[in-house]
Amino acid sequence: MARHGTFPSPPRPGDKKTQYNGVNCHASSIQKQELSQYMSPATISPNDDSYSAEKNTATRQEGKKNCTYPRSDQHARELGLDWNLLKGWTTVTTAHSRPVVDQVTRPVRDASSRPCYLLPLRWETHMSGLADLTIYLRQLSAQCDVVVVDGSPPLVFADHHRHWATFSSHIVPAADMAYCNGKVNGVITGMRTTTAEHVIIADDDVRYDTQSLARTLTLLADADIVVPQNYFDPLPWHAAWDSARILLNRGLGMDYPGTLAVRRTAFMAANCYDGDVLFENLELVRTLRANGARLVTAPGVFVRRLPPVFHHFAGQRIRQAYDSLAQPLRLATELALLPAVAFPVVIRKSWWLGWVAIIAVVVAEMGRRRHGGTVFFSWYLPLLAPLWLAERAICIWLALGSRVRGGVCYGGQRVLRAATADRVLRRRAANLGVENTRT
């Protein structure tokens, strides 16, 4: 199989000054040999017109602030590494370097007829699902250009590269990407990298088959964004619990999955999207629609999704509720759930709770029956809808409390906004159109 997106060799003594995607880090001699082949070098010209000392200094300081590599003897010991080896090599952006923000990631291929499968991910440690994901990506590479934008730590990245480099373009996020939401950093980097017009963006737990991939790409031929439908398989109890949420969303309108199909031209015309939000898929859809993109929801295109482990599922409860803060009508409805449940109990008319439960089951069953969903969603899942509503009635208030405290915890920091309001995005799009007209 032809290898796409291969990486150039490390620099040799006597070569021109090089930088490796602007990464400011320390590494051992062994890590140097491995990492240097993964990061595409760019020849630097100190006379380049794009050079700006002030801009470069800010970039270097930002890189140091976000650096996840050992920076001291104590930090190295905490990571279980030998500082005497680590301090032997340091790659930094110098005063004669081109600013990192001006780098352009090398395209995967020149032809745009072949679709691209874009996978942004970050694994903190070696995961047991690596073998399964490798098989899946290898199979996809027969139909798509596979681009993996990997923000994992160096040793994990190196392991991934050994598994994926022969059939995919495996790269690090662009150095100028510093959004709170790491997935957005990966998506924007991947969109810059590929030249394919049709791009499938997916989380690492999404598993397209041949049919769902073909149907999604067919719909994308007449749209700018396609939103398929996820379902969990296998189905442990906590995935069944979360499936009730999916069915309620289907019954009331639209469920947001872990994957989207996007036209690259529509994405680039929108001038990317904001990554300092929690609900990044909603942000992407809203941004593109504000710039005139055509959205097609595909509740009948079912794409398998692997269930999370229970620990991850438990950690998602408040974060998922926080997403509702970007949807005012949904937020008001969910905030009313707890008073609606508590009031009948206080006045000793608990029979009212039975009606609430029945309505929830009926709506979930409607969602299950829409567009052939009975094939992918088991008969008993609507019965779990009242339990999920009880969970959301509590978690939405906890999410609101997190908002008051400065945001919800995600990726080691607090994210304040769930997503940007439609009116704000439309105003930005209008201003962008005026600027483009002037230029």
Image (cartoon, helix red, strand yellow):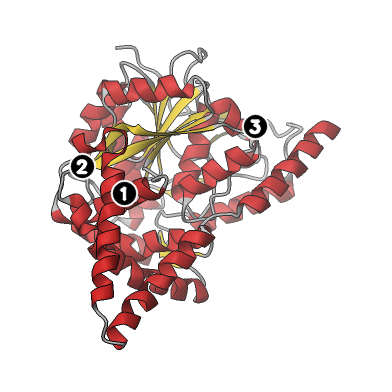
**In the orientation shown, which residue stands out farthest toward the bottom?**
347
- Residue 330, percent from left and from top: 46, 60
- Residue 94, percent from left and from top: 62, 44
Residues tagged 2 and 3 counted as in contact (Cβ below 8 A): no
Q: Quadrant of the C terminus?
A: top right
Name the residue type under label 2.
Answer: Phe
Q: Is residue 88 above or below residue 136?
A: below
User: On the picture, is 51 further left or further right than 307?
Assistant: right
Q: Is residue 35 above or below residue 107?
A: below
Residue 246 circle label: 1
**In the orientation shown, which residue stands out farthest toward the right?**
438
Residue 363 circle label: none
Name the residue type under label 3.
Answer: Ala
- Residue 348, percent from left and from top: 26, 86
Looking at the picture, tell me which residue is in the foreground, 295 or 372: 372
- Residue 270, percent from left and from top: 63, 36
* Whole-number angstrom distance, CA of label 2 to CA of label 3: 37 Å
Question: Which class describes the residues within 10 Å of circle 3: few (<14), some (14-19), or many (20+)?
Answer: some
Q: Which residue corresponds to mark 2?
A: 377
Please give the name of the residue rendered at 24% of the width and 28% of the height, measured from the top-left corner: 136
* Whole-number angstrom distance, CA of label 2 to CA of label 1: 10 Å
Residues tagged 1 and 3 counted as in contact (Cβ below 8 A): no
Please give the name of the residue rendered at 47% of the width and 24% of the height, measured from the top-left corner: 220
Q: Which image quarter: residue 115?
A: top left
Q: Which residue corresponds to mark 3?
A: 269
Name the residue type under label 1.
Answer: Ile
Helix, strand or loop at label 2? It is: loop
Please give the name of the residue rendered at 21% of the width and 28% of the height, measured from the top-left corner: 135
Looking at the picture, tell me which residue is in the foreground, 363 or 411: 363
* Whole-number angstrom distance, CA of label 1 to CA of label 3: 31 Å
Foreground mark, 1 or 3? Answer: 1
Q: Is residue 177 above or below residue 79?
A: above
